[in-house]
């Protein structure tokens, strides 16, 4: 059971917009910033969004993040086949004194 | 170019020990927090431990407290994870990651991972 809650799966067709939700609590998302990671199967995770809505250099602007209260969302617009991957949200938890992850969402591009 | 290269994984019996290493290059190692994150086969990501730039602060997930020790050698640009009293549930790919503690904590760069298998 992960501290942050994500849907286990999401899907969309090329060109569509999909969103992935991440729900937490006041000790993590409610008081700290949210980060998102993309992991293509068989490879190491990659930072996708940091500090709620910032994109590292090289990440397309099709990816965007937002946060409200104790929840956060990752949106992917103009879906492409190479976006098929697992997506994880994460945040620092003040109560646990550590980083907590969501269980991951497997995105399928139909 | 930032590079993180893990080593030291392998097969170990339950109750045994293993020491993982992470060689860092392409950045000023002593200026950054460093972390270990693991992923059990077919499962999600799990944070394991963080260490501050000078080693003065260390944080661990509850399940490894008292068994694992994170350390660093800034002169050698290296991060370590000493794992003792290993259990089957510690079987995972272990990733070394460079951390940034701003508004929370995030992992900016990741290594390719090293597999630890705990089995008799």
Image (cartoon, rainbow, N blue to C red):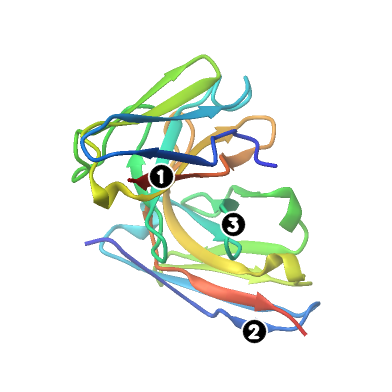
Instruction: Name the secondary structure under disc 3.
Output: loop
The disc numbered 3 marks a residue on which chain? Answer: B
Assess disc 3: are there few (<14), some (14-19) or many (≥20) residues with their C-alpha within 10 Å of its C-alpha.
few
Q: Which mark is residue B43?
A: 3
Mark 2 sits on what residue? B11
> How far across and down, in percent of the image, does residue B10 sit?
59, 83
The disc numbered 1 marks a residue on which chain? Answer: A
For this rendering, which residue is in front, A31 or B80?
Answer: A31
Mark 1 sits on what residue? A107
Assess disc 1: are there few (<14), some (14-19) or many (≥20) residues with their C-alpha within 10 Å of its C-alpha.
some
In this view, the residue farthest toward the top is A69
- Whether residue B108 is visible to the viewer of this picture, yes or no, is no
Instruction: Name the secondary structure under disc 2.
Output: strand
Q: CA distance from mark 1 to mark 2?
A: 32 Å
Q: CA distance from mark 2 to mark 3?
A: 19 Å
On the picture, is A71 further left or further right than A39?
right
């Amino acid at each position: 059971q992960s501290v942050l809650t994500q849907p286990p799966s999401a899907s969309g067709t090329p060109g569509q917009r999909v969103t992935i939700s991440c729900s937490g609590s006041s000790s993590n998302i409610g008081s700290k910033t949210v980060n998102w990671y993309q992991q293509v199967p068989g490879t190491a995770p990659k930072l996708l969004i940091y500090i709620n809505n910032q994109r590292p250099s090289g990440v397309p602007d099709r990816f965007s993040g937002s946060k409200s209260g104790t929840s956060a969302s990752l949106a992917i617009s103009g879906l492409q086949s190479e976006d098929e991957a697992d997506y994880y949200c994460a945040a620092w938890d003040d109560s646990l004194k550590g980083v907590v992850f969501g269980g991951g969402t497997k995105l399928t591009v139909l | 170019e930032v590079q993180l290269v893990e080593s030291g994984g392998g097969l170990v019996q339950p109750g045994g020990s293993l020491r993982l290493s992470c060689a860092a290059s392409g950045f000023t190692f002593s200026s950054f927090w460093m972390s270990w994150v693991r992923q059990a086969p077919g499962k999600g990501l799990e944070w394991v431990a963080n260490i501050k730039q000078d080693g003065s602060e260390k944080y661990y997930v509850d399940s490894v407290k008292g068994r694992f020790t994170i350390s660093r050698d800034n002169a050698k640009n290296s991060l370590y994870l000493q794992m003792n009293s290993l259990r089957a549930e510690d079987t995972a790919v272990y990733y070394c990651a460079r951390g940034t503690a701003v508004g929370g904590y995030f992992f900016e760069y990741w290594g390719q991972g090293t597999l630890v298998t705990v089995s008799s």
